[in-house]
Image (tube, rainbow, N blue to C red):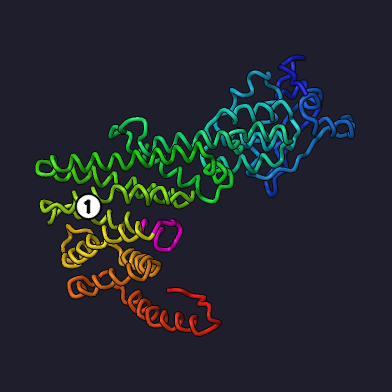
Amino acid sequence: MEPSDLVDGYKFGDQTTSDVRVCFKRADDQAEWFCCHSSVLSGNSKYFADWLSRNDIGSNNCIEVDCISADYEHYVKVLKLIYLPAESIIDSFESVRSAVGVLRASTLLKCELITRSCIEYLEAASWDEKEEEEILEVAQSLGSEEAVALLARLQAPNVSAVKNVFISAIRFATSMESPSPPFLDDLKTSAQEQIDFMLHEDDDTALVTMDEDVRSVVREGLKKLFSTLKIGLDLLTSEYEQLPEQAEQRVLCSLADIDWMANVLTKIEMMNEFVSGWSEISGYVLSVVQDKKYSSGLWLVKAKLIEVTGKAFDAVGYGSVVFPASSRVHFLRMWLPFMQTTKRLLDEKSKDDAIPQMDADLFQNIEGAIVSLVLALPSGDQADILGEWMKNAEQFRYPDLTEAFEVWCYRSKTAKRRLVGGLNGSGNPTVSL
């Protein structure tokens, strides 16, 4: 219904020309009557048009509308907006909250033009969290077409859009395009946080992460992070003596990014990429951080290395990443001495506030993964590793491989029995050890 644009000489509240009065009834409040015109009301509100069609204003020219106190001002404003030209309605809104209130009232009064104007204003305005909740609530009373227009920004994007955003976020979070200047660090952190949020129980994102284009970009991002770490370690050698804190911080930031990426890869079932890459770079990493010049330093870096490597042990030890036995043995032999030495030194310096204290649960989880890894190795490799562990048991208490040793002893003893049983059975041994 189109409004009456201050034509016919009618103005809101003009008693001299009014032929009908409107009151918005509130509980326990004194009634306030507004002088209006039946032709203006019926031309702009289906609610008033229906009332006027059922009643003779000659005998009853008072229209009462039930209204809660919180919405009273909004109902009054709708009544005033009915008298405004169409192009002036949007300009009359003072805030999102005001427009939401008017929308709620205009919807109940069936003022189509005012409702459309409210939606047009709200669709272009910014909302805070509380305002968004109110808009979602009032949208339930709208028709489907109006609700779609109002909530356009909240509609779930299609899979293609999610894919494009996810790829862009990965590129930014891993600094794939170019090294991020310091002022973009916060944006990189935000990108990482939003990727984590997108991966949290989201069906659309789950479909996207199985897309080969996405997985290719993730692999590329992981390689970039490993490359950045190597560059940081290269610079560490030359910068550490002059700017030790800056040099260490660069490496620490790279490790934090790799740690974050490991969590992402766990969620999208690509930990094999991380373990492979980390295994390849491990030799170089250890050759740098175990240099004598860093024997009394780089504690934050060393602690972070244990945390990152623990994720690889967890993936390999519990079978989520399948590696040949030789590769598992090689990886364990590379990192076990470093972990033993670093853990002992951290324990010795536990009262030094300058030395980071790592979570005991983290070490326990890594220990469990190592035990599981050892028990899955061929018995000969298990014997070699357990033999070395017992030789150094007095010097290093970590990790405790007692459980692995007991299982190995039991298996060794029962292996012969199973073999003999197979030979003395049907004559065709079923087990060969």
Q: Secondary structure at mark 1?
A: helix
Quarter holding residue 389: bottom left
Q: Nearer the viewer, residue 127 or 35?
A: 127
How dense is the environment of label 1, judged by Cα within 10 Å: few (below 14), some, or many (20 and up)?
some
Residue 164, given in percent of the width and then of the height, sits at 51, 33
Q: What quarter of the picture does the N terminus occupy?
A: top right
Between 410 and 217, the one nearer to me in the picture: 410
Can the viewer see residue 361?
A: no
Pinpoint residue 294: horizontal percent, then vertical percent.
13, 52
Residue at 65% from the left image edge and 34% from the top image edge: 102
Q: Position of residue 101 (x, y in %)?
A: 63, 37
Q: Which residue is mark 1?
A: 286
Q: Magenta stretch?
A: 312-324
Dot 1 amino acid type: Leu
Q: Quadrant of residue 173?
A: top left
Q: Position of residue 153 (x, y in %)?
A: 58, 34
Verify whether residue 317 appears in magenta. Answer: yes
